[in-house]
Amino acid sequence: MPDALPNTNRLPLDRRRFLWEVGGGLGGIALAHLLNGDGLLAARTERRAGGALERLHHPAKAKRVVQLFMAGGASHLDTFDYKPLLHKRDGEKWDPGEHIELFQDGFGATFCSPWRWQQHGDCGKPLNESVAPLGACVDEMAFIHSLVGKTGVHSQGTYLQATGFDRPGFPGAGAWVSFALGSANENLPTFVVLPDHRGFGSNGPKNWSAGFLPAEHQGTILRPGAANPIADLHAPAGHDGSALRKRSIQLLSELNREHLASRAGDSRLEARIRSYELAARMQLSAPEALDLSGEPQHVLKMYGLDHVTDSFPSEINEREETVHFGRKCLIARRLLERGVRFVQIWSGCDNGFPRRNWDSHEDIARDHRPMALGMARGAAALILDLKQRGLLDDTLIHWTTEFGRMPCAQGGRGRDHNPFVFTNWLAGGGIRGGTTFGPSDEWGYKPADRDHPTTCHDVHATILHLLGIDHERLTVLHNGINRRLTDVEGTVLHKLFA
Amino acid sequence: MRSPLIVPALVLAAVLTATQPGSAIGPSAEFNDRVAPIFRQHCVRCHQGAKPKGGLDLTSSKGLAAGAEGSAIVVAGKPQQSRLLEVVSGEKPEMPKNGKPLSVPEIQVLRDWIADGAKWPASVVIKEDPLDWWSLRPLVKPRVPSSHYSNRSQSRTPIDAFVLDGLRTAGLNASPEADRRTLIRRLSYDLLGVPPDIEEVEAFVADNDPLAYEKLVDRLLASPHYGERWARHWLDIVHYGETHGYDKDKPRPHAWPYRDYLIRAFNEDRPYSQFVEEQLAGDALEADSRDGIEATGFLAAGPWDFIGHAEVPETKIDGQIARNLDRDDMVTTTLNTFCSLTAQCARCHNHKFDPVAQEHYYSLQAVFAGIDRADRAYDADPAVARRRRDLEARLRELEPQQTHRDGGPSVVPAGVVAERSAIVAALAALPRQSLVYCGTVYSGSGAFRGTGADGGRPRTIHVLERGDVHRPGKLVGPGALPFIKDVPWQFQLPTGAGEQERRIALAKWIVEPHNPLTWRSIANRVWLYHFGHGIVDSPSDFGRMGQQPTHPELLDWLAINLRDGSQSLKRLHRLIVTSAAYRQASTSDPRAEQIDAGNARLWRMNRTRLDAESIRDSVLASSGRLDRRMFGPSFQTFLVEKPEHSPHYEYDKADPDDRRTHRRGVYRFLVRSQPDPFEQALDCADPSQIVDKRDESITALQALALLNDRFMIRMAEHLAERVRARRPDLDGQIAEAVRATLQRLPTASESRRLASFAREFGLSETCRLLFNLNEFVYVD
């Protein structure tokens, strides 16, 4: 039974937020780790400030999530979903025995992956050469090969996977998690987004907006290496001295408290005073979280960051993918250690040319190989690194994309969109490794069991479940409807659980 | 789904043993008056019919006796053993499943009724009347309560009579009137969205005229900035944006004429009926009128799936889905905006809570089935429009036949040739046409063809089972909702009526005087923007999932007053802001806090945080940079890179000192995919969703934006230069800076500390600090 939470948009502050803010939550909590010099405190001890759920619906297996989003539509057939039949029929006319609805023109022959497949791990999962680095992790991963979308339109597909709805206006999955669980470290945003270095994918920041949830739950963009890794984190040079910063906050606080004295009873005024103190602390903690200079050489090497250059050719290339994706994965690990709840990492941006995302209409070999290798190196390093630190047990990793690609060629070397079946995988907190779930049919065109496909709602329900949240009970009344991440659907995939 | 009522086995045996539900005469009235309304309001939507939820039918004594799938839910005389009470009580009651919990008095009524033997007269059958809901009942003018206060300062308008009545019932008192500086600041932000000049504040504070306040109100309502302020509210509701959103997020360079139309319409105080009609069908009702065309920007204000239309034809499934979602946005925007009704809930299934069936919803889609979102050419000058139309008609008359009957080339008389070339020349000499992005019949090529080639003939619309384009059901024509007595919900249009007649019919249905929703909706929206809370605080949802009015009679009185008067919004504003309720101080009172912490009864005025545009406008005004020129294309706070494919909107690369960007926030170019990060941190409206009330968040990121954004730094420098030019001495400069930002003089202590800060860090850093004060961003 859904128990509707009050729409906090409608209240200046609900009681819980009020108590938390006035009770010193916003100011008092969580700086401890910075001051104590124990940067990893927040992740080890469970803290929940400002979450809408007073208590979890059931014990959690995971406390935090990393979502890897492949913009453009990553081909399941050239990465994780091995289809021997494609190799057998390669070059023959493709006839699945039913109507074929393509998104674009250029219906070509049956088309096998340009690369070889090899089994990995104890589970013997076949992976494509393009994602071979993940071979070391397959015993930690659960593959879902029966994902279905609603349309082959990038925008709608991306919205669907990112927010559970195929149109704008809905909160991203990370915003829901932030809303439900609150922050474990107020000195950093709860939901962090690491966009592709070239730009945004389809829909841009709308994919991680707070929608109708309170604004603080929207994904905060973090740009490693930029002068301001978070927008307006620092003032321009000459306006950012530490004495100035300190005295400004002091005097502001003083004058604001005098203003408050004749306006007692308005918790917002108090909360706003504290927000400046928190801002000052974020100025210290964000750069620290992003600073990779203290990472040992062997860790940098894991992520492919041991010989970094920053100049790359204009076409997609393996080195660039490795460096950028790997760096985001390493930063994600550091953020998770410091209590960030949900990190979303993007690979690929919009559909400009030369191609810079997974939308390989023209040439799978040209785009997918470098993108996949770069992604696989970073993702594998992240899984193994979390594991060696004991964090994989309660960190959930989710790999997704807006749709898959067709078993037939488009124009000879490319593949068109396939919203009828594609792959997701999960790893870490609560997941039974080495699992393969819900096969696609022999072509990889549609699910093998068409009556029981998997949807993003099922995956979202599963992620929430592992976080201790019943997806049907995390609801917010908005414009007449008790909204939830999973719309009116979603079945928890218990078969994936350890 | 599990049964909502699981009765413990123990109770199973005790099926209504003590007394059978009786048929005594006395309790009958008791049941009808007190118990039945509770079941009717909270229970019978699910617990009725052939397959009631949980196997429990709560519409009759028979159903009660049968219990939930055979298990008793009531043990007469024994409330503690009655499952019914158990499921509706407690902190998070199990029932009603999707509705508001029962109130404490309601639960007590049920407890007493059960203790008293749970008597249910056999003749009483409870039926739910779908129209028996506050917002769907006809508007009836309520009596204005007689004033309880002779004190004129507490009861200035009929509004106060209603408010005081509510306060008295709750045991509350009104707050005293706020001081003059507070009042002028409040009024100026509320009506214009910009702060008053310090000179205006000082003159008003010193004004001895007993009508000084009323004169100030009139002056502000006559200001052209009023239209800018209230158009911005309207843009929130209709989710106006200047890019398409979705993939690629292409710009809409011709969206702004709709925004300008709104500013003019508010300033000219357009009667509300006409305001509604113009936005839905101005092109049809006021042909050749600039307002009529530009107003239909309303229909196209929301997002548009460029790829789903421009690259996927309607013959493909994905193309059909995109167009279905596009019409959904038009239906949603129209019904939410004008009727405060969430009709969109019926896209996939009949509305679960309000009387909107799928057939009604798809009939509303049929209203918009002939149009698309596109640029439309028009003449801003009606005389030119008429001349162009006449010339084009004449030119068509002179069109030669394609071929002669014998197949040979036609011979055109010399006179005709001359006239034709004269007309072509005359057409070419007419002023260039303007463009507006609006809802219109579109003639295109490729995948996005529109209905132009079919003369605008509307697409056929079917009820879609579960909203799925693969599952078309019944074919529907245009219509609205069955809410108005004696007005059929299906439009009776003459055969051959075009798509325009459909939109006209919907507009007429909305502004029909007996439409119970329209007038309540707009009266409530206006009230909400003045007070920060609505009388109904879910301004776009007056249905059963929305909030209920705190002052239902007041709302109806305001609605009727608006409808039956000149339909003037300015008159409504004046009525509201001259009330004593509005003029109260916003200071708190511990005793009143205990009774009504949310201030639902209005025992004080609400303190409000400035919205994103007002903060930016105020910073510009304080620093002497605000460019008050009105209208025209939007200014851009970003640079566009890679425009040829998916434009990158680069905010970091724009110059915050670019004077073109120093106009009021209502003229800012609104990118859907990438909102302006500075304004977003301040909770600006998200043009991808209908925003009927701004969020008011308090975050560290917001503090960082106001402290560190390059715009803030630069404006602080301008303010410093401005005050330096006025006063030679530091103390004087500090005083001027405080006057410019807070519209008051600093206290001696403030002055001392600010001067000391300025000596250490400079005057502009001091100005930057002033912009960050709570006092700067809150209005008492």
Image (spheres, rainbow, N blue to C red):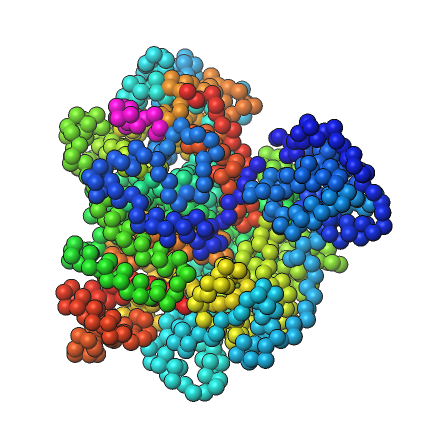
Tell me what residue is drawn at x 37 percent, y 33 percent: A63
Seen as rendered, the residue at the extreme bottom is: B208
Q: Is residue A278 left or right of residue B223?
A: left
> Which region is colored magenta?
A381-395
Camera-side residue of A90 and A319: A319
Assign the N terminus of chain B to one quadrant of the image.
top right
Magenta portion: prevailing SS class: helix
Tell me what residue is drawn at x 52 percent, y 29 percent: A491
Camera-side residue of B527 and B94: B94
Res B161 seen here: yes
Tell me what residue is drawn at x 47 percent, y 31 percent: A58
Camera-side residue of B253 and A144: A144
Camera-side residue of B65 and B633: B65
Q: Is residue B339 left or right of residue A395?
A: right
Whether residue A30 appears in magenta in the rendering, the answer is no
Instruction: Give the number of callouts.
Output: 0
Assign the C terminus of chain B to one quadrant of the image.
bottom left
Whether residue A391 appears in magenta in the rendering, the answer is yes
The image quarter in which residue A399 lies: top left
Q: Is residue A111 above or below residue B252?
A: above
Q: Is residue B722 left or right of residue B250?
A: left
Tell me what residue is drawn at x 29 percent, y 76 percent: B745
Q: Position of residue B57 (x, y in %)?
A: 74, 38
Q: Is residue B757 left or right of residue B324?
A: left
The image quarter in which residue B617 lies: bottom left
Res B325 seen here: no
Q: Is residue A369 above or below residue B473?
A: above
Q: Position of residue B348 (x, y in %)?
A: 60, 40
Q: Position of residue B7 (x, y in %)?
A: 67, 31
Q: Position of residue B665 (x, y in %)?
A: 37, 63
